[in-house]
């Protein structure tokens, strides 16, 4: 298939970017979206031009590294990661717009690559459990009901890709933070620090410059791991409760 | 006390205030409609005048109306604050957006709808609330008790097609605002549950259609009556 690509090119975080149009030909509809970009980049390199920079790592839908806002949607038309998106989702002759995630908290480093370390700092603020190191604990030492384990796992599947932020009209990170807060807060090991965790993670989220939630539901509709909006309600509950009852004055 | 000031600055508490004030305004709207419905009784405004007179002299209602004003102000100020933060969170806009595929239009335009409602509120308060406070209203006596004939002011206003039209159109804005806002407020309060959320959403949609529709019916009926 032949395609017209309108790709955001930006030299670095200090310069302004712009869309540049490229044509790619003879792309297999079985290739993945990133493979299609690989083909484009090989062509650019052969011509001595600078290849288009984009993030990727596992290309298996599990690491959360790939991004790309494709034709107005994060990770493109399917509810999956960009690396798991295939060219059969497009038609030959189509124009495809490819942009980086756009948020004040995710500055563009180059082309389609953004700096998502704001998420790392939110995790550092509370997305952990404190344990004394020592021997490996027995796996069944702390009984966890199957239902709780499953629910925690559903939230733990968040890969931190940032599509929720990219999709949200307010560039809000509520879905991501709520996934992390819910995952840890449900488990006995995480309950100990549940209140300070939600307080600190929300404070860091606000400090990073993400917007507030308007409950549009765009995040959950685009999340490749199908984290539900109910998680945000739960986080609101947890946060309000923690603020009123925690001992952090 | 810094925990309290910090809390009030957090995005979730700001949203909480939007939701609580919004829900109060919904409650107020319901009571307001129950009163206004008397405008279309075929009694030349007697029921409505007596009702308005009673409300104006009930200390509890007067207190609630003070709160109502305060809540509108809080709702508006926080909406401006939130909207500004939300705008700055994305300094560079997307070149191509397909937002309509993942979220309802109303949910993305609460600020615009709210602003339109605010414009209406100013017209509304200037036209009625302010006029009622003035002494220029003709009096009327029922069973020996004299009171302002506020019905006359309403009737005169709605006999003007433009005035009536502003009311009817504004009710669409209220309807759209609430078609997202009603259920959204519960989500903000953390009330999302498989059992109740579908019901809350259904009631919200119903409320957003029925209440503004009945509100809009009043000027329409009075206008039609004024023709004949
Ligand atoms: C009849 C009067 C009004 C009622 C009943 C009402 C009700 C509501 C409700 C229930 C919400 C949902 C809160 C939430 O999502 O948690 C809301 C949100 C909102 N309202 Fe209003 N409102 C009214 C007037 C206004 C006015 C006059 C403005 C602004 C000038 C306004 C601006 C907004 C905005 C921007 C939001 C979205 C806030 C957000 O989610 O970030 N509203 N309103
Ligand atoms: S919640 Fe979903 S969209 Fe957001 S970072 Fe996690 S996996 Fe990505
Ligand atoms: S590259 Fe790892 S999830 Fe896409």
Image: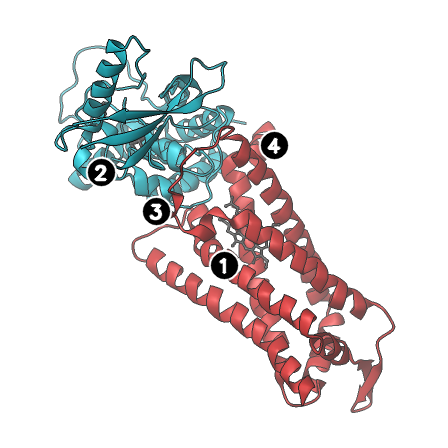
Chain colours: A cyan, B red
Q: Residue at x 79, y 70 (%)?
A: B132
Residue receiving disc 3: B101
Instruction: Return the residue at label 2.
Output: A90
Q: Is mark 3 within 8 Å of ligand 2?
A: no
Determine the chain carrying the residue at label 1. Answer: B
The reply to whether the residue tagged 4 has its Cβ within 8 angstroms of ligand 1 is: no
Q: Which residue is mark 1?
A: B176
Foreground mark, 3 or 1? 3
Q: Which residue is mark 4?
A: B5
Quadrant in which residue A57 is drawn: top left
**Which SS class for mark 1?**
helix
- Secondary structure category for the residue under label 4: helix
Q: Chain of mark 4?
A: B
Residues at marks 2 and 3, common chain? no
User: Is the same chain shared between marks 3 and 1?
Assistant: yes
Inter-mark Cα distance, 1 to 2: 34 Å
């Amino acid at each position: 298939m032949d395609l017209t690509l309108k790709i955001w090119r930006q030299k670095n975080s200090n310069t302004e970017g712009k869309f540049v149009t490229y044509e790619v030909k003879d792309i297999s509809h079985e290739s993945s979206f990133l493979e299609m970009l690989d083909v484009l980049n090989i062509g650019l390199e052969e011509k001595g031009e600078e290849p288009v920079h984009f993030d990727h790592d596992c290309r298996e839908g599990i690491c959360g590294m790939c991004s790309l806002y494709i034709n107005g949607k994060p990770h493109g038309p399917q509810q999956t990661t960009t690396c798991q998106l295939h060219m059969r989702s497009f038609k030959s002759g189509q124009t495809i717009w490819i942009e980086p995630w756009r948020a004040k908290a995710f500055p563009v480093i180059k082309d389609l690559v953004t700096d998502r370390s704001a998420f790392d700092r939110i995790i550092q603020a509370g997305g952990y459990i404190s344990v004394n190191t020592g021997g490996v604990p027995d796996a069944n030492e702390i009984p966890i009901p199957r239902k709780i384990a499953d629910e925690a796992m559903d939230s733990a599947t968040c890969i931190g890709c940032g599509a929720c932020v990219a999709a949200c009209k307010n560039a809000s990170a509520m879905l991501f933070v709520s996934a992390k807060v819910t995952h840890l807060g449900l488990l006995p090991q995480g309950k100990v620090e549940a209140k300070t965790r939600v307080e600190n993670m929300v404070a860091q989220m606000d400090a990073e410059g993400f917007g507030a939630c308007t409950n549009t539901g765009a995040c959950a509709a685009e999340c490749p791991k199908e984290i539900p909006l109910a998680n945000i309600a739960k986080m609101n509950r947890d946060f309000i409760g923690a603020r009123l009852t925690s001992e952090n004055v | 006390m810094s925990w309290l000031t910090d809390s009030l600055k957090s995005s979730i508490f700001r949203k909480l205030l939007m939701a609580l004030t919004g829900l109060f305004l919904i409650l107020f709207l319901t009571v307001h409609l129950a009163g206004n419905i008397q405008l279309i009784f075929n009694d030349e405004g007697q029921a409505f005048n007596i009702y308005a007179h009673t409300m104006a002299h009930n200390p509890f209602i007067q207190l609630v109306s003070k709160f109502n004003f305060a809540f509108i102000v809080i709702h508006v100020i926080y909406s401006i604050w939130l909207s500004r933060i939300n705008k700055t969170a994305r300094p560079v806009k997307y070149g191509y957006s397909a937002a309509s595929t993942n979220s309802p239009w109303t949910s993305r335009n609460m600020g615009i709808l709210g602003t339109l409602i605010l414009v209406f509120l100013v017209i509304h308060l200037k036209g009625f609330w302010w006029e009622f406070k003035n002494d220029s209203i003709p009096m009327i006596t029922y069973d020996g008790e004299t009171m302002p004939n506020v019905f006359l002011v309403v009737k005169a206003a709605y006999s003007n097609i433009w005035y009536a039209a502003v009311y009817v159109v504004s009710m669409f804005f209220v309807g759209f605002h609430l078609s997202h806002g009603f259920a959204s407020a519960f989500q903000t309060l953390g009330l999302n549950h498989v059992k109740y959320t579908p019901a809350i959403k259904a009631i919200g949609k119903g409320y957003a259609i029925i209440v503004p529709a009945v509100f809009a019916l009043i000027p329409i009926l009075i206008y039609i009556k004024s023709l004949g």
